[in-house]
């Protein structure tokens, strides 16, 4: 417990402060009965932040900037191609389809980064551009609606997808994969000499990222109740900001999905607080940037002091 | 385990260096000596499948050409540079120990923290690791104790052949004695140990046989009574003893 708090202390601190501020400023919106809806509003960002985390944990510059476009593509394919054109409405078809698309793109990114060994940022930038164009080709303009069960996942059932991801991560943390992922992110040469399958672990991290991005795409679709080819990409950078804010080291090997989720909730709460003040979206961006820089500096200072106390 | 043997045939440590052949059996402790950079390091890494040279390394007829082969055949390598290729500084002592063998802690599909801890405690006892708590980061330990954790990590893989690259470098005298006893016990249990050391005394105290390297070739091989400081040094510098 102390370990969790130590790592995420700053993000949790901001969370508490922002939550109280929101409760005071905006009691109606933050009434307990509204929490499922609020969670639904925050879900795409949380999902995008969760998705960005595994590859960052895998280290050596691991990053996936195609998370946002994957969300957009999933949304377009699920609504336009599968639901409206092919008439498939069952969640047991649409969810697996979304996850499969995500995982396939993740596998492609993973192969580029671990087999071909292109720098991850370049490889996923390529994917980012390809997917952006592909999404617009499939779906030039927003279209709707989404099936009712999916819209409910942004309302009363908003906890369901996130809860399942939490359960999945909880289980993953108790498999060798998690330890190997952290080891690879911490020091890949040492991991190799310890017999950890470094490339495979990294590859799986990309697949996991893709899978979670697929899920985030569904949460986005649920929230907007339709498919919009242009929203997805916006999530890319803000999700990475949330990850950094949540105490996940961009150098790899430290942090976890819980931190990323807390970071995303922080950003969401900041957003809703400033919106309550009627602040312009430009100022909102300044606020994001500032809080991110402050958080990263504080985390770095904390790391330095723990290192010194053990040296 | 009794007739375990690691065979090296016509291994060249460098292109156009004289090839060398030798056989290392279970229960044996073989020392590698030589001036730094004269091939003993390459030789040890070749046994671990980390180098690609002409020649063949076999364990009981299984070819060891890659690091993966070595892993599959329980040939375990403990690197020299603890900081860059050994420890994971950000990770706890317990996880540093368990990282090479996470599957052993499985109860059903998931890992049990309790099983991992129990496994660590047995090695902690055997290696006399002095550590505050298994949850502490490994950087909280002294160099000697970090080395013991790395050894515990390697030994947890049940090696048949243990390749040690200067295992007592930067390790205090008390810990060395613990390690020497451990190495002798492991050899008595039938493991083959190959130890590269920069200290001749260590090799003379510990090993049954010493291979002395010069210019990426085997300059001398001595065993038993013939092993002596003078002779080893002479071979290292290419003088006749």
Image (spheres, grey):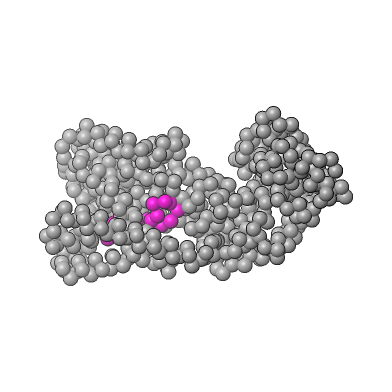
Residue B70 appears in view: yes
Q: Specify the quadrant that holds the C terminus of chain B.
A: top right
Foreground residue among B162 and B74: B162
List the single residue furthest toward the right: B225
Q: Is residue B142 magenta?
A: no
Q: Which residues are magenta?
A: A248-266
Q: Is residue A258 magenta?
A: yes
Foreground residue among B96 and A36: B96
**Relative side of A310 to A239, left or right:** right
Q: Residue at x 83, y 46 (%)?
A: B231
Residue B205: which quarter of the image? bottom right
Residue B44 appears in view: no
Q: Residue at x 39, y 67 (%)?
A: A5
Foreground residue among B231 and A250: B231
On the image, the x and y values in percent for residue B145 come to 62, 62
A217 over A288 or under it: above or below: above
**Relative side of B191 to A240, left or right:** right
User: Looking at the image, how many numbered discs can be counted on the residues?
Assistant: 0
On the image, the x and y values in percent for residue B147 come to 62, 58
Q: Residue at x 30, y 53 (%)?
A: A241
List the single residue furthest toward the left: A278
On the image, the x and y values in percent for residue A139 come to 20, 35
**Relative side of B180 to B155, left or right:** right
On the image, the x and y values in percent for residue A223 come to 21, 50
Q: Residue at x 31, y 50 (%)?
A: A240
Residue A34: which quarter of the image? bottom left
Residue A273: which quarter of the image? bottom left
List the single residue furthest toward the top: B16
């Amino acid at each position: 417990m102390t370990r969790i708090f130590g790592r995420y202390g700053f993000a949790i601190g901001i969370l508490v402060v922002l939550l109280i501020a929101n409760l005071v400023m905006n009691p109606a919106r933050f009434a307990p009965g509204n929490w499922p809806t609020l969670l639904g509003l925050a879900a795409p960002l949380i999902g995008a932040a969760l998705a960005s985390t595994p590859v960052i944990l895998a280290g050596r510059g691991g990053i996936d900037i195609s998370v946002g476009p994957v969300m957009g593509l999933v949304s377009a394919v699920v609504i336009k191609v599968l639901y409206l054109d092919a008439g498939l409405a069952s969640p047991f078809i649409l969810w697996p389809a979304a996850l499969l698309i995500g995982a396939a793109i993740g596998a492609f990114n993973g192969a580029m980064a671990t087999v071909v060994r292109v720098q991850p940022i370049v490889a996923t930038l390529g994917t980012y551009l390809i997917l952006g164009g592909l999404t617009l080709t499939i779906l030039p303009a927003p279209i709707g609606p989404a099936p009712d069960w999916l819209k409910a996942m942004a309302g009363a059932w908003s906890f369901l997808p996130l809860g399942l991801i939490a359960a999945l991560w909880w289980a993953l943390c108790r498999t060798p994969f998690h330890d190997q992922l952290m080891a690879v992110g911490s020091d890949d040469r040492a991991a190799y000499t310890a017999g950890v399958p470094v490339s495979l672990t990294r590859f799986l991290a990309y697949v996991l990222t893709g899978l979670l991005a697929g899920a985030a795409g569904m949460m986005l679709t649920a929230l907007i109740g339709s498919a919009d080819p242009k929203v997805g990409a916006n999530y890319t950078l803000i999700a990475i900001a949330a990850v950094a804010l949540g105490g996940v080291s961009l150098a790899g090997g430290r942090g976890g999905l819980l931190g990323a989720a807390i970071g995303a909730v922080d950003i969401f709460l900041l957003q809703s607080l400033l919106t309550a003040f009627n602040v312009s979206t430009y100022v909102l961006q300044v606020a994001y940037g500032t809080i991110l820089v402050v958080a990263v500096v504080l985390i770095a200072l904390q790391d330095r002091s723990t290192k010194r106390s053990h040296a | 385990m009794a007739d375990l043997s690691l065979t090296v045939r016509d291994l060249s440590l460098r292109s156009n260096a004289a090839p060398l052949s030798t056989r290392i059996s279970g229960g044996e402790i073989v020392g590698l000596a030589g001036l730094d950079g004269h091939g003993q390091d390459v030789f040890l890494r070749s046994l671990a499948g980390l180098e690609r040279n002409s020649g063949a390394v076999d364990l009981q007829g299984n070819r060891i050409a890659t690091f993966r082969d070595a892993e599959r055949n329980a040939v375990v390598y403990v690197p020299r540079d603890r900081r860059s290729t050994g420890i994971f500084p950000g990770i706890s002592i317990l996880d540093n120990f368990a990282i090479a063998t996470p599957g052993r802690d499985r109860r059903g599909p998931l890992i049990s923290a309790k099983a991992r801890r129990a496994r660590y405690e047995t090695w902690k006892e055997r290696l006399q690791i002095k550590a505050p708590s298994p949850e502490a980061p490994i950087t909280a330990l002294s160099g000697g104790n970090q080395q013991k954790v790395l050894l515990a990590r390697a030994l947890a893989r049940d090696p048949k052949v243990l390749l040690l690259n200067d295992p007592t470098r930067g390790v205090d005298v008390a810990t060395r004695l613990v390690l020497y006893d451990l190495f002798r016990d492991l050899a008595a249990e039938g493991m083959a140990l190959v130890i590269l050391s920069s200290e001749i005394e260590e090799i003379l105290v510990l090993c049954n046989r010493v291979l002395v390297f010069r210019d990426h070739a085997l300059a001398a091989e001595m065993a038993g009574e013939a092993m002596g400081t003078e002779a080893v040094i002479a071979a290292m510098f290419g003088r006749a003893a």
